[in-house]
Image (cartoon, rainbow, N blue to C red):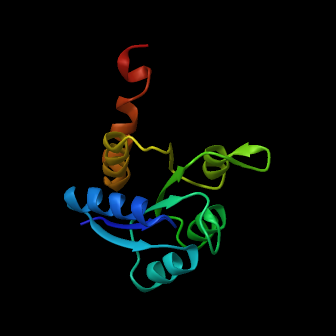
Amino acid sequence: MTRILILDDDYLVRDMLERLMRRARYDVETAEDGAQALRLHRRHPVDLVITGILTPGEKGLGTLAEFRRSDPAVKIIAISGGGRIGPLSGMRAAALSGADRTFAKPVDTALLLAAVEELSAPPRLRSISSFENTPASQGR
C-alpha cells in the first residue's frame, strides 16, 4: 500500500487531503510543518509527499529540496495557494525544486487523485501511463 505524507500548515487543507487519500485507500500521515514532516519520513519512510509550497518551519521549497536530497525516490506533489517566490510563481519554483507535479488551490480532487495514482504506480506502468497522455500516442 502506498504511504503518503501530507504537509500543510492549514489544518482544514490537511484534513481534507487526509480524508480524500484515506477514502482512496492510501496509508496517510500528516504534518503541519517541514521539520515534523522530515522527522516522520526518517522514522517511517513514505512513497509520496503532498506539500503546500509556503509552509512554516522549513518553508515549502526548503522542505521539498530536503526530501529530494535525502530520498531521491520519493514522489512529491506541491500545492500552491498562489503568490511568488522571488521572480517565480510558487508552482514554477516548486517544479524547479524537484516537485513531480504541481497544483494550484483550490485543487481539483479528481486530478490530484489521478496524479497520486500515476506516481504510485510501478515505474513500468508509470511510463506507459505518461506515454498515453502524449501527442505521439494520439497519432499527432
Q: Residue at x 43, y 86 (%)?
A: 43
Residue sticking out furthest to the top: 140
Residue 135 screen position, x and y as percent: 44, 20
Residue closer to the observer: 35 or 47? 35
**Vertical comparison of 57 with 11: above or below:** below
Residue 82 screen position, x and y as percent: 61, 45
Residue closer to the observer: 123 or 105? 105
**Vertical comparison of 72 with 95: above or below:** below
Q: Residue at x 43, y 21 (%)?
A: 136
Residue 117 screen position, x and y as percent: 30, 50
State which quarter of the image contains the C terminus.
top left
Residue sticking out furthest to the right: 87
61 displayed left or right of 20: right
Q: Residue at x 62, y 59 (%)?
A: 54
Residue 59 screen position, x and y as percent: 64, 67
- Residue 107: quadrant of the picture: top left
106 displayed left or right of 22: right
Q: Residue at x 56, y 48 (%)?
A: 81
- Residue 28: quadrant of the picture: bottom left
Residue closer to the observer: 118 or 29? 29
